[in-house]
Amino acid sequence: MRLILMGPPGAGKGTQAKVVADHFGIPAISTGDIFRANVSQGTELGLQAKKFMDAGEYVPDEVTNLMVRNRIDEDDARPGFLLDGYPRTVAQVAELDGMIKFTGHELDAVVVLTVNQDELVQRLLQRAEVENRTDDTEDVIRRRQELYAEETEPLIDVYRERGKLVEVDGIGEIDEVTERIFAALKSVRES
């Protein structure tokens, strides 16, 4: 199973990625985790990424693409993977297409968690309070939502046109959302 899990910041992607990946016996691959691993290991790509991360900027596509390519080439990802946070741009979609095609496989589905923006802001403000994230102010959170809308939402249309998109309501208890994801994936596999 080769999946992408998308949704705006605060939609619950990280929580759901682990559960879904465990269910299918595939690794949940988060770009954030890949960046941190490369930085902590002092790889050449990690050093390049660190410069951008330290400046609070997005890591450029060239660096991100290479890190993702290296990660999905690892043995545990051969039977499949779940990507969380990648692709983020239309250019990355094309790059991922090439990576998957090279392996002789194809993408099974793209799951998008949909959540009302005000609900997202409240979730993230609550998380900021619980985790003492002083940088997560309402203005910063709303800006991240705007960036998602500008840069990542166009990917939803790309995958919808390809017939790979599955939209799942991300509001509710974690188990309820998980059940919706599995039901949606089951309908995709049967079609």
Image (cartoon, rainbow, N blue to C red):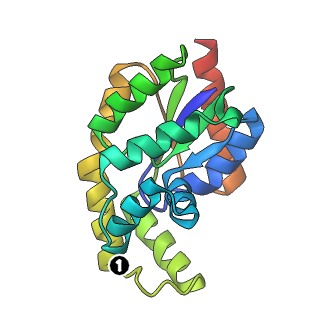
Q: Type of residue at label 1? A: Glu
Asked if residue 67 can be seen in this view, the reply is: yes
Asked if residue 171 can be seen in this view, the reply is: no
Residue shown at 54% from the left, 87% from the top:
132
**Where does the image place residue 94, in percent across and percent down from the top left?**
32, 28
Q: Nearer the viewer, residue 87 or 182?
A: 87
**Where does the image place residue 73, in percent across and percent down from the top left?**
58, 33
Residue shown at 68% from the left, 49% from the top:
18
Q: Nearer the viewer, residue 24 or 127?
A: 24
**Where does the image place residue 119, in percent across and percent down from the top left?**
45, 65
Residue shown at 57% from the left, 35% from the top:
72
Q: Could you tell whether 159 is left or right of 6 in the image?
A: left
Residue shown at 31% from the left, 44% from the top:
153
In the rendered image, which quarter contains the C terminus? top right
50, above or below 134, in the image = above
- Residue at label 1? 138
Q: Secondary structure at mark 1?
A: helix
Image quadrant in which you'd find residue 24: top right
**Where does the image place residue 174, in percent across and percent down from the top left?**
67, 55
Image quadrant in which you'd find residue 41: bottom right
Q: Nearer the viewer, residue 42 or 190?
A: 42
Residue found farthest to the left? 150
